[in-house]
Each structure stands twice: as structure tokens, then as C-alpha cells.
Image: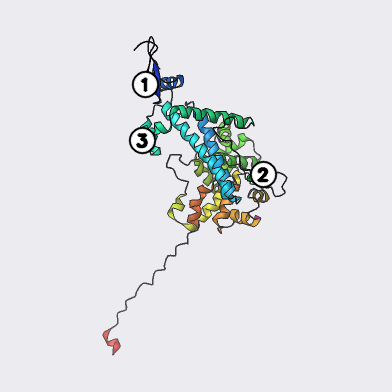
Amino acid sequence: MAVGAFRNATCPQCGTPFRQERRQGRPFTYCSPECKASASRRNKGSEGPGSSPYDDDLQAVGEDIDQLANNLLAAIHNGDGPYELLWIVAEVQRSLQDFTALNIARGRARGQTWDQLGAPLGFSGERLRKKWPMSMITRRLDNYRANRAARQAGQPAVSPAVPSQRRPPAEEADTDNDTATAAPFATQTPPQQLAGALSFLQRRTGKPLRQTAAETGISPSHLSRLLAGTRRPSWPVVKNLVAACDGNPHEVRPLWENAHRPTGPLSAPTQPDVASAGDPGQARAQLRDALRGLYLAADRPDLWRIRAATADTLTIGHIARALTSPHLLGWSVTSRLVFALGGRPADLRPLWHTATRPTPVIPSSPPPTTHQHFMADAFG
């Protein structure tokens, strides 16, 4: 082949066909400098967990999906119609597509094959490569980063390829409307909720951190990390801290369990042991403790603020009964309260279902049969 001629080749990093130029020296092996750099990192073993160049994007897209899911639940609670809900669904789908593209790029950068990446999606490697060529993934991620930077700067979306996350005109809020209500409390991750509850308890005592740490049996620096949410404590440490702050460990325990929930691909929402055992009475007590834990993590706001966060769909009586009474409220009321307090209704729904089961009635045992032996002559 003469110098300057081209031949068809396939990039060993991303699998994309490209035109390889015949030149003096070693020919181009990869389709782009990015693929060459990714292959170099993979060969050197530097593309391990925590060192991926896509990690910042991964967290940002995950937060977008979480926010959109909460927007969808808020719209359901507000009684929005199908037209408005479908707008949010379209935004969720776009973010999920960004998330898919991002993880394919991460997997390829880590040396995973197309077959390995296609298996969770139900695709063969060849089908996945054709559906998600690296050139399209690169363009999609570039568009996402540009739009994210524009949103952070308060500017409109910079690329028509990814529509701006905008509600339809019918949903545009009227800020002058007297019926405008307060937004729900900010949704936090389970570790943030645990840290928020512990921080509230510590602040309420008025004690210096050093004194609280000494009473808990840990160092002041360790306590600071726990209250900031950068360290996940063991239950004995949390229990000692709650005791030092005169708190109720039953309210904090559900938050601690949720913060330690496994995050594997098949992990399910946290379900306390008693819920899985099917004891409705204890499940009701645990559900009340879980609601009080969310209330604590939200800094125990005034009940009127909580009612405003539910768009006045719950009464003060509803909220007070949910937090104090052993009697259950309907799931619609419970889920609105959980969402208003910044929690995730899906985490508590299995517990609510267990709590609403009829309490099994154990039939009483019949009295033991007594056998009386009569003498034959007693009958005459």
C-alpha cells in the first residue's frame, strides 16, 4: 500500500470503524486521541474505581435523575394531568439515556467488552456497539456537559440536540398567585438524613463538640465528620451519641439502617426485620419511628410548615396523628407526608403494607379433655 493511501480499520478501544492512513512509521491504531489515551490508562491500570474521568459526570447525571423523580412525585401529589406528567417523563428518559451513554463510555475506558456491557441491557455486544457507537456517545456527553454548564450559569440550553428542561406553558408558576405554597423540604440522601438528624440533636444540647465527643467516646474530629455526613458511623457509636444528646434511638435507628442500605444493582428498599416477619403491630410502631426520624432529619419543623410543603393537602391533624398516634393513615396521606419531609416514599411503602395487614388472630386452644373413670357400680 502506498504512503498516503487509506484502508478500513476498527478501533480496538471503542470498536468504531475508521479510515486508517498509510504513513511512515507505525500506523494509527486508534480512531482518536481520546481512545488512545483511554487505552493507555487501561493498560497502565490507572482506570480503577475512583479515578475515572467520568465520575463527576456520573454523580451529576444521577442527581439529575433523582431530582426529576422527585419532581414527578410532586406533580402527582399536586394533581397534575397526563400532559404535564409526560413532560417530566420525557426529561427523565433523556437523563436515563445520558446515564446509559456515560456508563458505556466508563466501561469501555475500563477495558470492558461490548458483550459485557450489553448483557445488563439485554443486548449482544454487536447490537450495543451499533446502537451506541462511541462517536454518538461522545457527542451526547459533550452536549450534556455544555447544557449542564449553561444551567449552572443560569443560561438557556446551548444545544438544540438536548431540549432544555422546561415545563410546558400550562405549568408555568404564577408567582403572584395567592395560592402558591411552600416547596417540600429538600430531598437528601440517606447518609445526609442521618447526619442532619444527629447534627440537630447535637445543636439542641448547646454543648461544645468536644464535650459531646467525650460523652460519646469518640474524638472531636471523628464527631465533626459524622455530623458533616462524610463518615458512616456504626450503630453503637450512633446510639452513644443519641444518648449523649438526650435523643430517642428508636427515631434514629431507621435513618441509620437506610444510610447503610446496600447499593448493589438488585438491592431493594430497606425493610426492617420485623416487617419481613409480618408483625403488623410492630410494623406500625416502626413506621411511626421512621416518620419521626424524617421529621428529626428535617430539624423538627413547625407543623404549619409541613402542611404548606404538602400544598395544604394534609391537615395539621393528619400530620400530628402520623407522628404521634399508633393508628395508621392511608398511603396517600403517608406518602405525601414522607415526600414533604424530604424522604422517599418507596423506602417506607413495604413497611406500610406490612403495618396495614390484619393482625392475625391466634385461635385459643380448647380446654384439655379430662377423662373421668367411673366405677361400673355407679350406674346401678
Q: Identify which residue is drawn at 51% across, 50% down.
A: 348
Q: Residues within 10 Å of mark 2 (few under 14, many from 20)?
A: few
Residue tagged by mark 3? 124
Q: Secondary structure at mark 1?
A: strand
Mark 1: give few (<14), some (14-19) or many (20+) Cα within 10 Å.
Answer: some
Q: Is residue 139 left or right of residue 299?
A: left
Q: Which of marks 1 and 3 precedes in the sequence?
A: 1
Type of the residue with mark 2? Ala
The range drawn in magenta is 311-315
Q: Quadrant of the N terminus?
A: top left
Badge 1 or badge 2: first in the primary sequence: 1
> Percent from the top left, x then y, of residue 203?
64, 40
In what element is the residue under mark 3?
A: loop
- Which quarter shows the C terminus? bottom left
N-terminal label among 3 and 2: 3
Among the 4 quarters of the image, the one containing residue 23: top left
Q: Is residue 116 left or right of residue 251?
A: left
